[in-house]
Structure formats: C-alpha cells, structure tokens
Amino acid sequence: MPSAGAVTLGDLVGKVGVLRVECDRCFEAGRYLVANLIHEYGADAKLSEVLANFTADCPRRRPTSPARCEAGMPDLAGLRI
C-alpha cells in the first residue's frame, strides 16, 4: 500500500502493462512498458515523480509559461488502485 495515498509503479503490476503519457497542449505522447519503468525507477517510484521526469524538458512546465503543460496518464483515470 503506498504511503500518503501516492500511487507507485508497483501498484500497476497486473493492472496495466503499458503506461501512456500524453499532453493535449504540447501534443506530446509516449508509451512505456511498466516492467521497464520498474526496472529503471524501481517499484516504489511514485507516478507523480515518474511523470515529472518524463516532462522535465518541456518548456511549458515553467511557471511563467502562459499555456501550462497538462501531461497526464490517461489510462489511470478509470483504474482502481
């Protein structure tokens, strides 16, 4: 069970095989195998931290950007974790 309500990569095992990351504002998208993400970041990595790593180079992540990056993981919306 994740601490403080944070969802981890390990929580996705057996529920999602591929994790999609998309941003409608930036028109960026990617697909990542959960097993590979666990190998790279560890099963205890919080999804919020993984998403921050994916979008770290996005110019719209800057606080001064008028059109902020809205990257998210759409497959998780209906998932019970």
Image (cartoon, helix red, strand yellow):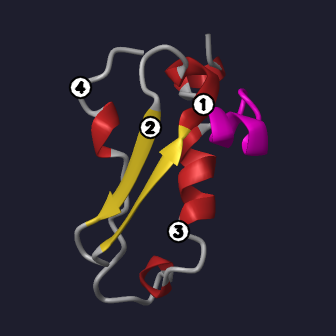
Along the line of sight, the residue nearer the viewer: 64 or 68: 68
* Picture layout, residue 53 above or below residue 19: below
Q: Amino acid at mark 4?
A: Gly
State if disc 4 and disc 1 touch (CB < 8 Å): no
Looking at marks 1 and 4 on the same chain, the residue that comes earlier in the sequence is marked by 1
Residue assigned mark 4 = 78
Q: Nearer the viewer, mark 1 or mark 2?
A: 2
Real-space Cα separation, disc 2 to disc 3, in angstroms:
18 Å
Q: Position of residue 39 (x, y in %)?
A: 76, 37
Mark 2 lies on a secondary structure that is strand
Q: Amino acid at mark 1?
A: Leu
Residue assigned mark 3 = 55
Looking at marks 2 and 4 on the same chain, the residue that comes earlier in the sequence is marked by 2
Q: Amino acid at mark 3?
A: Thr
Q: Residues within 10 Å of mark 4 (few under 14, many from 20)?
A: few
Is residue 9 in the magenta section?
no
Q: Residue 76 — which label?
A: none
Real-space Cα separation, disc 3 to disc 4, in angstroms:
23 Å
State if disc 3 and disc 2 touch (CB < 8 Å): no
Looking at marks 3 and 1 on the same chain, the residue that comes earlier in the sequence is marked by 1
Residue assigned mark 2 = 18
State if disc 4 and disc 2 touch (CB < 8 Å): no
Along the line of sight, the residue nearer the viewer: 39 or 22: 39
Mark 4 lies on a secondary structure that is loop
Residue 47 falls in image quadrant: top right
Instruction: Report the side of 4 relative to 75 (left or right).
Output: right
Real-space Cα separation, disc 1 to disc 4, in angstroms:
16 Å
Residue depicted at 53% across the width and 54% down the height = 51
| The magenta segment | 35-45
Residue 34 falls in image quadrant: top right
